[in-house]
Amino acid sequence: MTTYPQVKGLRVKYLSADPSGAEDGQVWYNSGTGKLRVDGIALAGSWSAGGNLNTGRGEMGGCGIQTAGLAYGGNTDGAASNTTEEYNGSSWSEQNNLSTARSFLGSTGTQTAGLAIGGQVGAPTYASQTAVELYNGTSWTGITALSSAKANSTAFGISTAAYSLAGQDGAASLVNVEFYNGSSWSEGPNVNTGRNDAASAGLGNSGMLVGGYAPSTGGRVASTEEWNGSAWSNATNYPLVLNQLGGSGSSNTSAVFFAGDSQPHPSPPKLNTANVYDGTSWTATGSLARVNGQMGTSKGTQTALSFGGNGPPTFKVETEEFTPPGTQIKNLSTS
């Protein structure tokens, strides 16, 4: 950290209060406190506890932001669910059900405009679905279906500009991408590596796809791909090889990915690690309190929300809230 001897003799602004919008490394004297001050003390990202879901679940749909989350569908004690819950920043409340119970569904959007995309119905068929439903803040309505059935897919965007990525159709992992414009789906450029159980983040023409299970490469992958609005390109690999991870972010330069499953089937342990991406490289950040996988997440913001999941030994009810890395103002040492 910068100390007083390092700035002694330099001109330092004499201010009555800390400036707004101070730049990293900026130094000033605060006459109100009588302290020499500096901006730019790095803070690691961190997770804190939120309110519990009413029903423990994993393999669910999730979207929204940290103060307005949405959880729906998923697997509850071995059965596909149609239940929906809303989060207000402190507690979850039960809402109207999905039309069709399903798990392993793709999801994105906001608390008042959320999408439930494809997925898998329960026994006896466990068939992948083309059905898509839209939540309007009160109830679910069926809308235009996907062109191809898929489960274990991921999605990013908003309800009028959403991307459904990869997944599986019951026979193979998929490379296909479909784009929803608010009224219909159209096929877009494929991702480079077919995979399922991956995570994604982004909005509009800036998105990313991370990790997953890719049988063509022999199992789990660390592969990261970026979307620029016209094509997918390979980017810096995630630090771990895993699937069942969560992700949230506004672009392919501001996202966090976390937890997941890094070991071979059939009984893999889960992780609680997290990493942030700046468009070039990955940086480890604060870990979750619990190991987890196949949880619900926020969408479109690095200030992430993680809820539920299938971390051992049972389906989870816990919620965790992420505060991204940043900087803070501190007093300089006079030693």
Image (cartoon, grey):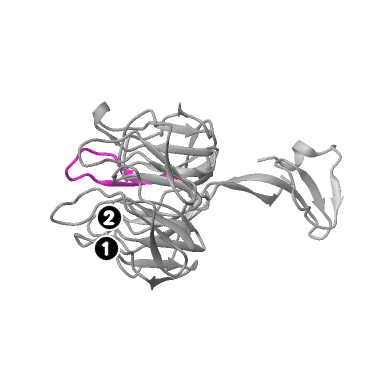
> Element at badge 2?
loop
On residue 103, which mark appears? 2
Residue 217 lies, with reference to residue 206, above or below; the image says: above
User: Picture coordinates of residue 5 (x, y %)?
Assistant: 76, 39
User: Picture coordinates of residue 212 (x, y %)?
Assistant: 32, 38
> Element at badge 1?
loop
Near mark 2 (Cα within 10 A), the count class, few <14, some 14-19 or many ≥20, is many
Near mark 1 (Cα within 10 A), the count class, few <14, some 14-19 or many ≥20, is many
What amino acid is labelled 1 in the image? Answer: Ser
Tell whether 297 sits left or right of 21. Answer: left
What amino acid is labelled 2 in the image? Answer: Ser
The answer to whether mark 1 and mark 2 are in CB contact below 8 A is yes
Residue in the image at 31% along x and 64% along y:
99
Residue 26 lies, with reference to residue 92, above or below; the image says: above
Residue 245 lies, with reference to residue 34, above or below; the image says: above
User: What residue does disc 1 label?
Assistant: 81
Residue 263 belongs to magenta span? yes
Residue in the image at 29% along x and 64% along y:
82
Tell whether 145 sits left or right of 162. Answer: left
On residue 24, which mark appears? none
Q: Quadrant of the N terminus?
A: top right
User: Picture coordinates of residue 72 (x, y %)?
Assistant: 35, 61
User: Picture coordinates of residue 272 (x, y %)?
Assistant: 36, 48
Residue 269 belongs to magenta span? yes
Residue in the image at 29% along x and 39% along y:
262
Residue 85 lies, with reference to residue 31, above or below; the image says: below
